[in-house]
Image (cartoon, rainbow, N blue to C red):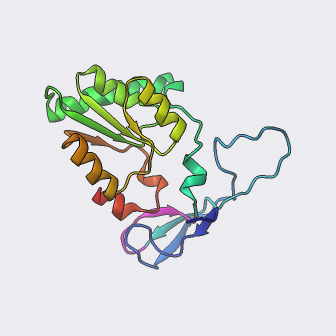
Amino acid sequence: MKKTHYRADRCLLCGSGKLELALPMVPTPIGNDYLPGPKQPQECYSLTLLLCRECGNGQIEDVVNPELLFRSYTYSTSSSLGLREHFRAYAEDLLKRVGKTTDALAVDIGSNDGSLLRAFRDQGLRVLGVDPAVEIAKRATDEGLPTVGDFFSSKLAKELRDRHGLARIVTANNVFAHSDQLPDMADG
């Protein structure tokens, strides 16, 4: 997808054309896409929510090019004290459920600055992040939280498994909501 966006006319999950208007919304600029000065024009995209009548998937009408959305993404999870605490408790809860294994691998897809990875690392796990925001991924890696600066896919998943072994824990928080490649991500 080279253009800025396309209008989804099929379900991004099952491929059905049976999409129905669920919630009309006003077109909006990209969030966290700050402008250098006032009153500069920004492209707006539909946030109208569509519902697939075949599988129940809810999706936004305009699918924005992920390169535009995420390669230069600026938001860092660690800027929110509440999220850092949430991820610490979340990691502890997951480890109670799956059992803490020495040197197990935890992979976080859409890992941002590695806040969740840090919580897993603090519990003694090996960690690996995947995030398309190249600068944020680099900063996380520089802080000892290895992060691949790319979009997650089934191809990348195979490469990571071959290179790092099987993961004991795989997380993907608020990631599927931002992709038009749902089946491939799930396969990964």
Residue 72 among those drawn in magenta:
no
Q: Which residue sits at x=42%, y=74%? A: 53
- For this orientation, the residue located farthest to the right is 39
- For this orientation, the residue located farthest to the front is 163
- Residue 116 appears left or right of 180: left
The foreground one among 50 and 121 is 121
- Residue 45 appears left or right of 108: right
- Residue 81 appears left or right of 121: right
Figure check: 176 above or below 139: below
Main structural element of the magenta stretch: helix, strand or loop? Answer: loop
Q: Quadrant of the C terminus?
A: bottom left
Residue 72 quadrant: top right
Residue 64 quadrant: bottom right
Instruction: Name the spot of residue 159 as percent of width and height, x first.
Output: 28, 51
Instruction: Name the spot of residue 44 as percent of width and height, x first.
Output: 71, 57
Q: Which residue sits at x=76%, y=52%? A: 42
Magenta segment, which residues?
A: 53-62
